[in-house]
Amino acid sequence: QSALTQPASVSGSPGQSITISCTGISSDVSDYRYVSWYQQHPGKAPKLIIYDVSDRPSRVSNRFSGSKAGNTASLTISGLQAEDEADYYCASYISRATLGVFGGGTKLTVL
Amino acid sequence: QVQLVESGGGVVQPGRSLRLSCAASGFTFSSYGVHWVRQAPGKGLDWVAAISYDGNNKYYGDSVKGRFTISRDNSKNTLYLQINSLRAEDTAVYYCARERREVNPVPLPNFDYWGQGTLVTVSS
């Protein structure tokens, strides 16, 4: 069982926006800004799309954005495209004892 | 360009040991913390271990403490993962991943580059 909770699946039509949530137990997501998001296509390695809650690597489309409120972080994808269909994972720093944890993953289907 | 290339996976019997390697190139390896992340077939990502840029600080996930050992050789630009007492539940693709910040004594789980992974199958 993951310490960070994500919905198992979300779906949307091309051009629409979707949001994936990542809910943590109290001391992880809420206390730190070290939340990141990854996109993974089948058979491929994950790709960083958001780090430090809301920052985006230069090579990542600005259709991807991140935010956090309380103990829930969120990934929003706007202007959905067929190529966005993939699994998405959140990750967070926990503490120096347990450095990091991933969410269970969310499968995005573009209808 | 930044490259991480894992090797050492294969089919191993339960109870045996294995050492995975991750060869880094295209960046100053000795300036970055690196992690191992695994993914069981059809399952999600599982953070395994991390080591600081200088090798002085090591961290492990609860499920592998006592059985896995992470290490690095900065002179060879290589990361290692020694896995002992292998169990069926260790079957997974093992990825090495670089932390995006340089010279960070606590290698945070912000992974900007990943290898292609190496598959470990534990089976009799």
Image (cartoon, rainbow, N blue to C red):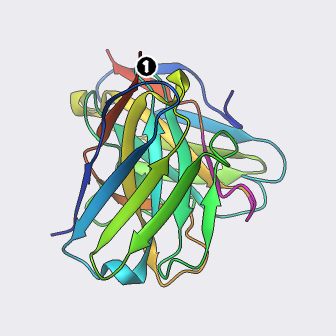
Residue B122 falls in which quadrant of the image?
A: top left
Observer-nearest of A2 and A109? A2
Kind of residue indicated by mark 1? Ser
Would residue B111 be found to the left or right of residue A28 on screen? left
Would residue A8 be found to the left or right of residue B19 on screen? right
Is B124 within the magenta? no
Badge 1: residue crowd in 10 Å (few <14, some 14–19, many ≥20): some
Q: Which residues are magenta?
A: A95-102
Q: Is residue B1 above or below residue B45?
A: below
Q: Residue furthest right?
A: A26
> Label 1 belongs to which residue?
A11
Q: Is residue B92 above or below residue B118?
A: above
Residue A60 in percent (x, y) is at 30, 56
Task: Name the residue: 34% across, 37% down.
Answer: A40
Q: Is residue A62 visible?
A: no
Residue B27 falls in which quadrant of the image?
A: bottom left
Would residue B65 be found to the left or right of residue B35 on screen? right
Residue B78 in percent (x, y) is at 31, 68
